[in-house]
């Protein structure tokens, strides 16, 4: 009995690891191949909130990761490429875009043998790695990621097909009423925060509920999916650590939006489930995968429609809640690199480093202006005052060089860095060294 339990746990861990690795490889592959295009799309967003939402939906649907999208958004806010109101709209759209994964699992995970296509897709991707002449090798990880994702889903199907006795605790959860629902939401949030992927947790819930529909309560499945939306905010929180004030406000909006949306869904839980049942005809247990995927979509669409008219008010409220610290940290330089390990992309780092090198150039120009004005007798300050000021600026620029250059070297060693990235990073190092010398 013990060996059987250990075997199930290890098989599940392996299948989940393969699923997560496939998702991460897929997301990283798309960012590696089309990262600049996606970031230009984000950077060109107008103040139109509807355009921002559609962009969030599109980018997240492409890269299959709302976490990666929110990290990009927080990074762009930190680099002052996006405003807080623009970021709010994109985050709303990212929550809708992440539902695509649930539909992929629902439509393809149970209708045919996905293992039969997983290996050929992976093989195509592996072969593409050697086609550098045609410049498609950067997209090799996309196919390999899809292959691993499908293979992970197939392994999950074999692992999560359990007997009724093993699922009896879920029946007890359902019998607890609202408390069972709340506990399920918390479990969904914690599990998602641990694995950094609401899509993976939703895929597990869909697989588990579909294969064990007779003993898996529909209400518990819905609560777990709602909880996963709260847990998905962990990437935004991590990426905002050490960032500027508006980036932190963006993370607070993401957390508040998902938490408040889930609370409203819990208050209207029965009518909410009835709406999903109305859209997807038939008892949930006969088509559990479609019910869960639709619930995920309806929740995020309804939450977006509810809060979208109040984007400016939300931005004003979070500005009052998250206030400037008032501390003066300008004496010493601190590198504002904010991207966490998960969902990392070289392009995100280069955007931030371009901004920092621009700031470095600004300090050098100020020093040159002071010296030039002194030499032409246009500066009323004493030579000692100018010398002290230039010396302090010199120390600050030295600190910038000592922080930026090693960081750029680390970026060149990242697995997601392609040839163009390394050329760009090399040029940035040369510029940084030239500014420090100047």
Image (spheres, rainbow, N blue to C red):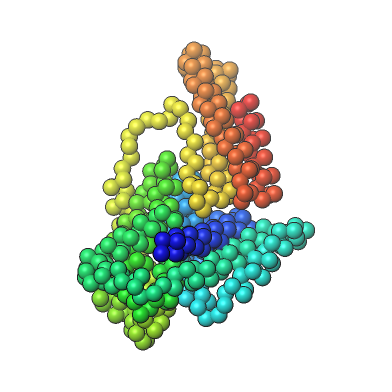
Relative to 301, is 187 above or below?
above
The structure residue drawn at horizontal position 30% and vertical position 64%, both measured from the top left corner, is 184
Q: Position of residue 366 (x, y in %)?
A: 53, 28
Q: Left or right: where does residue 429 sit relative to residue 52?
A: right
What is the tally of numbered marks visible in this picture?
Answer: 0
Instruction: Judge by depth and name the residue closer to the eye, 42 or 213.
Output: 213
Q: Left or right: where does residue 422 sit relative to residue 251?
A: right
Quarter of the image for the C terminus: give it: top right
Instruction: Judge by depth and name the residue closer to the eye, 15 or 326.
Output: 15
Asked whether the viewer can see residue 373, the reply is: no
Q: Left or right: where does residue 270 sit relative to residue 308?
A: left
Relative to 326, is 247 above or below?
below
Q: Position of residue 433 (x, y in %)?
A: 64, 31
Quarter of the image for the N terminus: give it: bottom left
The structure residue drawn at horizontal position 52% and vertical position 16%, both measured from the top left corner, is 387
Asked whether the viewer can see residue 352, the reply is: yes
The structure residue drawn at horizontal position 66% and vertical position 35%, both measured from the top left corner, is 430
- The quadrant in which residue 365 appears is top right
Q: Position of residue 418 (x, y in %)?
A: 66, 50
The structure residue drawn at horizontal position 57% and vertical position 37%, both measured from the top left corner, is 407
Instruction: Judge by depth and name the residue closer to the eye, 190 or 154.
Output: 154
Q: Left or right: where does residue 21 sit relative to residue 213?
A: right
The furthest residue to the right: 133
Q: Position of residue 106 (x, y in %)?
A: 47, 76
Instruction: Judge by depth and name the residue closer to the eye, 10 or 224.
Output: 10
């Amino acid at each position: 009995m013990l060996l059987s339990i250990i075997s199930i746990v290890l098989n599940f861990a392996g299948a989940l690891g393969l699923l997560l690795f496939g998702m991460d490889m897929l997301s990283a592959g798309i960012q590696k191949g089309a990262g600049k295009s996606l970031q230009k799309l984000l950077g060109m967003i107008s103040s139109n909130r509807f355009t921002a939402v559609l962009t969030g939906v599109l980018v997240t649907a492409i890269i299959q990761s709302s976490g990666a999208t929110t990290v990009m958004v927080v990074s762009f806010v930190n680099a002052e490429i996006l405003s807080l109101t623009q970021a709010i709209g994109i985050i709303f759209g990212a929550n809708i875009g992440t539902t695509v994964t649930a539909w992929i699992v629902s439509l393809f995970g149970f209708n045919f043998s996905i293992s039969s296509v997983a290996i050929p897709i992976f093989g195509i991707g592996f072969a593409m790695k050697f086609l550098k002449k045609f410049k498609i090798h950067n997209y090799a990880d996309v196919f390999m990621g899809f292959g691993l994702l499908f293979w992970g889903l197939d392994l999950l199907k074999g692992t999560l097909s359990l007997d009724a006795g093993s699922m009896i605790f879920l029946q007890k959860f359902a019998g607890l009423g609202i408390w069972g629902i709340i506990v399920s939401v918390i479990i969904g949030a914690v599990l998602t925060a641990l694995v950094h992927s609401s899509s993976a947790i939703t895929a597990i819930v869909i697989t588990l509920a579909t294969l064990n529909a007779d003993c898996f309560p529909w209400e518990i499945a819905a609560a777990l999916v709602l909880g996963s939306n709260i847990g998905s905010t962990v990437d935004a929180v991590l990426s905002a650590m050490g960032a500027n004030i508006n980036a932190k406000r963006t993370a607070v909006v993401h957390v508040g939006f998902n938490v408040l949306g889930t609370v409203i869904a819990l208050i209207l839980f029965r009518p909410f489930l009835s709406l999903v049942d109305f859209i997807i005809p038939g008892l949930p247990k006969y088509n559990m995968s479609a019910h869960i995927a639709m619930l995920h979509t309806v929740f995020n669409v309804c939450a977006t429609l509810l809060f979208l008219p109040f984007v400016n008010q939300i931005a004003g409220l979070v500005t009052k809640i998250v206030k400037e610290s008032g501390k003066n940290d300008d004496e010493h330089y601190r590198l504002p690199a904010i991207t966490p390990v998960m969902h990392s992309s070289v392009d995100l780092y280069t955007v931030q480093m371009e901004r920092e090198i621009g700031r470095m150039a600004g300090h050098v120009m100020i020093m040159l202006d002071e010296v030039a004005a002194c030499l032409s007798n246009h500066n009323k300050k004493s030579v000692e005052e100018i010398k002290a000021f230039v010396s302090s600026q010199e120390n600050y620029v030295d600190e910038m060089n000592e922080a930026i250059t090693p960081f750029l070297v680390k970026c060149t060693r990242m697995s997601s860095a392609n040839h163009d990235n390394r050329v760009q990073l090399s040029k940035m190092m040369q510029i940084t060294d030239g500014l420090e010398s100047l």
